[in-house]
Image: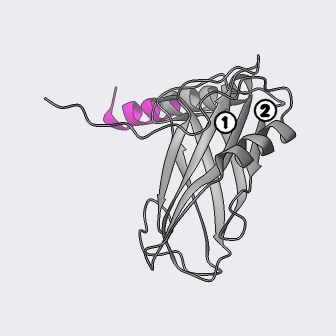
Amino acid sequence: MRRGSWTALTAAVMLTLTGSALAQTDKLNFPNRQAVIINNANSYVDLTSFGFENRYSQSTFRLITNLAWKNVSTKPITAFEVVVLKYDPFNRPIFGGGQWMITGHNSGDWTPLMPGQSSNDGLVGYESEPVLTSVVYVRAIRFQDGNVWSADLPAVEKAIRQKLPVLKDLGEVSPSAKKAKSP
């Protein structure tokens, strides 16, 4: 076979495999999945959009999480932290949710998020996950002037229970940072 034929054959096979993977995306997501925003810091950061899905990315299916926000305060924000909680179809917490630090605008732009500015970012998981319900809230905000705001966790838990009364076990609502192991 000539080189051009091999290139065309390889391209056709890759398109077929990618098309098959993309066709499977709907089959790897619950059609009634819920992405729930708890806007507990709405005087400072407004979480405007949140979603998740298992999608073909980087040669395998992975859980992709997307979030958008706006600085509605009067001060520039250096960073803020959100917590993403995940639950399976039986309303049980899934290990693997956790904290997500948003640095300035997003992971590609660490300059302060100025008042009135919006941005968005996403996370790519290691593999697909059987998530039916996911919840996001703001746990902490550091303003450019050095002040730090922290969430009222009992109020966050109450808001989650009001929006999702089917969740009997919320799991770890405020997961702690992973600490480095000493040698």
**In the rendered structure, which amino acid carries the disc numbered 1?**
Glu
Picture residue at 65% right of the left edge, 31% below the top:
86
Q: Which residue is mark 2?
A: 33
Q: Give 133 or 21, whichever is nearer the viewer.
A: 133
Chain-order first, disc 1 or disc 2? 2
The secondary structure type at the circle numbered 1 is strand
Q: Give 145 or 69, whichever is nearer the viewer.
A: 145
Residue 91 rendering spot, x and y as whole percentages: 76, 21
Q: Which residue is mark 1?
A: 53
**In the rendered structure, which amino acid carries the disc numbered 2?**
Arg
Q: Is residue 108 left or right of residue 41?
A: left
Residue 166 rendering spot, x and y as whole percentages: 85, 26
Picture residue at 45% right of the left edge, 80% below the top:
145
Instruction: Name the magenta segment's main secondary structure.
Output: helix
Residue stretch in magenta: 1-12
Picture residue at 58% right of the left edge, 45% below the top:
83
Residue 28 rendering spot, x and y as whole percentages: 68, 24
Dot 1: few (<14), some (14–19), or many (≥20) neighbours within 10 Å? many
